[in-house]
Image (cartoon, rainbow, N blue to C red):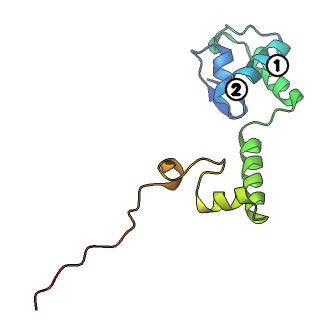
Amino acid sequence: MARIAGVDVPVEKRIEVALTYVYGIGRTTSKKILDESGIDLNIRTKDLSEADLAKIRSKIEELGIRVEGELRRNVTQNIRRYMDIKSYRGLRHKKGLPVRGQNTRSNARTRKGKKKTVGGQKKKLTKK
């Protein structure tokens, strides 16, 4: 297994795709890293030498790309900041509702969770 930024990237996949397993690196960033480090996009991860892996790691550092823990921490801090200043986005995060303006009347089940039925119960009629 090849480790890049603390993540075991798959060895059977092309390195261009395997790099996307690292949080914060997508296809475009992956291509940029490999082009600048001079590594072929189509080579399999298992065929890379340790020198090539070291080139990739150093290029990620050199380009200043935030990955994995640092990026996750940064995103969490940004969300917490929104909540602290009580912005609209922060309030939506706090309530567990969609943040980016989506409708919530009929959809948004992913954010809202399982449906909670609200309404009055029918009262049973009692005989006198």
Q: Dot 1 surroundings within 10 Å: few (below 14), some, or many (20 or more)?
A: some
* Callout 1 amino acid: Lys
Q: Which mark is residue 26?
A: 2
Q: Which mark is residue 23?
A: none
Most foreground residue, 111 or 39 = 111
Image quarter hosting the C terminus: bottom left
User: How much space separates mark 1 and mark 2, taking CA atoms?
Assistant: 18 Å
Residue 13 point in image, percent of width and height: 59, 15
Task: Determine the residue positioned at 79% across, 64% down.
Answer: 85
State which tag comes first along the sequence, 1 or 2. Answer: 2
Most foreground residue, 15 or 83 = 83
Tell me the mark number nearer the camera, choosing from 1 and 2: 2
The residue that disc 1 covers is 55
Locate residue 31: give its quadrant.
Answer: top right
Residue 16 point in image, percent of width and height: 68, 16
Residue 37 located left or right of residue 118? right
* Callout 2 amino acid: Gly
Residue ranking furthest to the right: 62
Residue 105 point in image, percent of width and height: 50, 53
Residue 22 located left or right of residue 61? left
